[in-house]
Image (cartoon, coloured by chain):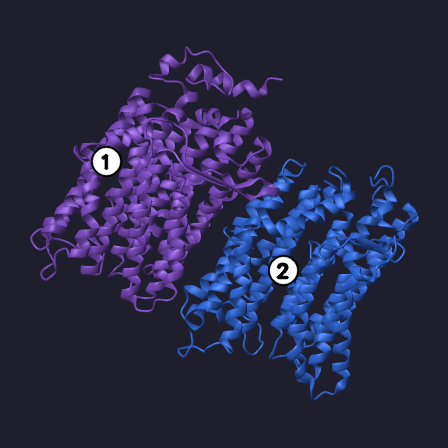
Amino acid sequence: MTTLPILTFLIFFPILGCVGLFFLKRPRTVRVYAMAVSLGEMVLALPLLRFKTDTGGFQFVESVPWVPAWDLNYFLGVDGISLLMVGLTVIMLPVCVLCSWASVRERVKEFHICLLVSGAVCVGVFSALDLVLFYLFYEAILIPIYLMIAIWGGEGRDRASLKFILYTLAGSALLLVVVIAFRISGDTFSIPELMKLDFPYRFQCLVFSAMALAFAVKTPLFPFHTWLPSAYVQAPIAGTVLLSAVLAKMGAYGFLRLCVPLAPSAADFFAPLMIAMSIASILYGGVVALGQTDIKRIIAYSSLAHMGFVVLGIFLFNVKGAQGAVLQMVNHGITTGALFVMVGFLYARSGSTELSQNQGLGKVLPAFMGFWGLLAFAGFGFPGTNNFVGEFLVLTGVFERNLWVGAITVPGALLAAAYMLRPTQKMAWGEPSRAGKWVDLKGREWACLLPLAFLVLYLGLAPSLFLKVMNPALEELLSPFGVRQTPIELSTNTPGHSGSVPAGKETFRISMQEPLRP
Amino acid sequence: MKGNILLIVPELYQLLLLGLLFIQSIAGKTRAPDVEKWLPWGAGVGVLIAAFCLDLEGVLFSECYRVDGLSQFFKWLLALGFALTVLNAHRSPELPNDKRSEYYLFLALSVWGFMILASCVELMCIFLALELASFSLFPLVPLRGEKREAAEAAVKYVFFGAAATVISLFGFSYILASQHTTFLKQLISLPWNVCSNPMAVAGLALFLCGMLFKLALFPFHSWAPDVYQGAGNETSAYISTMPKVGAVVVLIRFVPVFKPGLDITIILAALAAVSMTYGNLAALVQKDVKRLLGYSAIAHAGYILVGMVAGTALGVSAAAFYTFIYVLMNFTCFWVVCRVSEDGRNLQLSDLDGLHERTPVLALVLTIGAVALVGLPPTAGFMGKLFLLTAAWNRGVNWLVIIGAVNVAVSLYYYLNIIRHAYTKADPNEKAVPIIRPLFSGIWGGVLAAVVVLFGVFPGPLFSIALKVGYGILGK
């Protein structure tokens, strides 16, 4: 087994690539160069395919002392969940470069620097195993994304970018305190080490609340989503793609990597609240998406709904739910990312993202509408597409947990069909059409969409490889929760301390009162 | 222990610079600008000398003067600050040519005072060194063309400074009366709680007022924004950093007294919290860039104090580290302010509009400086805050840590305002005025920004030097 620091390469290769960008002048050269760097990043990621799917734990681990005085380590590694996220980031990076080929005309060099740095930082977030390193990447991503929205965004970019960064940073302000509290209470910054520790219940509740706030803003979840529409709509296309496909995953990933494993008892206690918030996201996102007239906005709100499914799956604490959640994270990245890319292509032709300006494309742009149809169907989870598998697993998980909760979730899935089919129908056959002389997809646009469309179908028809990758990690994640099928069974469990987490309503009450006992 | 002249090389070198500046100032008014030809080099050599003296230790002058990790670290920082100030004031448009030598003379004298202060371990010496440093600082403020605001700022600074000094001296008399010694070594082993020794605690509190005034900590902050606004740009850069360094040194010397749970510690912790919050909230509405940085300085004074109330070696080291970083971050921002304000006027936020079109390099430097002041990774500001807050956790002031973390989010808005003006607003003037001497400003600005990022990514080496500060004061 060679010990090449693959993850370090993945983080630093794009950053080194940026150094080269400083010396380039012509926009075209810059684009080609950035494309080469992002493809190089994909090649560098190939060794990750050697990931062993039969064992749990972290692989490709690198650990170097960083600041010995504070016990900080440069500690990287991936398990099944983060591997998928790293893969998603690496795939989306060239897509971002390609989709901004024509749309970004000013300060091309700086734009691509922002893009490559963002890509590198995203890989960092998903592979960091040291809490401080995680926090460092988690916050550092704000700056390039902020600049992307603020400089290359649409009309309302000033307000949108401000709202985005203030909201996210305010949400994660207490995350720093959590990092510090873990360091002092657990005596280490290493996430795998902290996972083994058993923190007092009260402590868990406090850190869980702080972390959940940060990640709920980033994901976003229902009452914390208000930055989302403006940021998604105002950002340049590549920015929107990054925001929806990768950044949104950071929130969900935070739940999976920190909230649930480090504070399992608290996660169990707060699960009903989290489930309620995610169902609210699904329903609210769906209803609002239905009422939009701007295509970009429709996708933005649908993104809110999809992320609701992800968080819902995480907090069900059963295997199907978690599988669905992680799969849905990947799916949402691919599908929503691709949909936003297509909106960008449309904008390049019509100069508007309003539905009324982009009608009747069926005859003129058949290839475009073909792709759109596929992605839109994937967007509402049509059987055979990737989202179907994810949503189906989550829904099964919900029904396993509770019939009534499942019953509330189903309208969310139906809403998705409504809000995706409405724009699709108008775009294909709507009247009056302005599309008379528009050109259909060009080679570059094909190159952008084909791989994503392939993934949509591949994941939809043969998701077993991905499930195999994530399963060991999910088993570890769920191990403190026991294998549980229905809540009724669980209530017969013996009440335990925070290590083996009690669940179900009766034991719940006991665990809530525990800290009050002398 | 016998005195060794080699122990005080940085001070002697500074004295040599002082002598040269004095000769230059009486040599004749016509040749005054010559001073700028050699002084930056001279100050640069001073930084190197101070860096070589980092490991010295010893006691001099009847045990009033102590050379240790703490003093050497801060002397190095002071030499660095002096060099940066000199570089920053290079060909400043507002300094009258015939007063240039005097300006640098007083500047060097003030730095010399702070350097001596860094080594003093006896209350009387501390007091004298502090006064030497402050008095030579006062004449710098009005040296700004013929501006009335500068004179106003100078008057405010002198009056507030004098009042603080008097209070400090008054407290000094109480300490002497109740503890019967002025040597810090003995003072720190004496009891400092209100029940057993109320007079001493009152005295110490009053004595510290003088230091907190220099630190611009709430409620001794009111001079800071006004003086920053009134003084010349490069003078503000100096006033916002070096006196703070001096105050931090003295406070660190007193840290062994601040045991957790003592009344004086709790008061300091409360002041730190109020200072952070007040500084950040007041900065939110500022339009004048220097005034904004003035309020940010008040907030940062609060942060530095967090490390001291932690009362551990790591905490003290974190405070020293943060002070170092703060000097760098602040100079990074002021560097851009001084370069953009080509005629020396006070910059409004709107003057920064479209900066990235005029000079992309300076816009980037300003962004890095501002991001570091917020405390976002991957800059040194983040590492500094992380160390400070980690040191203070579970030391009885968890509420202070939480307030500190929340304040990061509050402060983001106004620092971001700077970045917003530089990047998102268009330049109101059609013909963009390029910056004078782009190479000079670009290179040094770039170096400053690079150092700020570098210490954020590799804080280890610098922190290991800062660690000697903590171990020297509190032991391992």
Quarter of the image where the C terminus of chain A is located = top right
Direction from residue A193 to residue A292 in the image, left or right: left
Q: Chain of mark 1?
A: A
Secondary structure state at the residue bearing disc 1:
helix
User: Looking at the picture, which amino acid does disc 2 mark?
Assistant: Val
Location of residue A406 in the rendering, given as x and y in whole percent from the top left corner: 29, 25
Let me know if marks 1 and 2 both belong to one chain.
Answer: no
Give the residue drawn at x 32%, y 27%.
Answer: A321
Circle 2 is placed at which residue position? B327
Location of residue A172 in the rendering, given as x and y in whole percent from the top left corner: 48, 43
Display colour for chain B: blue
Secondary structure state at the residue bearing disc 2:
helix
Location of residue B345 in the rendering, given as x and y in whole percent from the top left corner: 57, 75
Quarter of the image where the N terminus of chain A is located = top left
Q: Which mark is residue A387?
A: 1
Location of residue A490 in the rendering, given as x and y in whole percent from the top left corner: 39, 14
Q: Chain of mark 2?
A: B
Q: How far is mark 1 from mark 2, CA to CA? A: 52 Å
Q: Which mark is residue B27?
A: none
The reply to whether residue B230 is visible in this rendering is: no
Sort mark 2 into few (<14), some (14-19) or many (20+) by Cα contacts within 10 Å.
Answer: many
Q: State yes or no: discs 1 and 2 in contact (Cβ < 8 Å).
A: no
Say which of A370 and A217 sits in front. A370
Give the residue drawn at x 25%, y 31%.
Answer: A465
User: Looking at the picture, which amino acid does disc 1 mark?
Assistant: Asn
Direction from residue A206 to residue B208 in the image, left or right: right
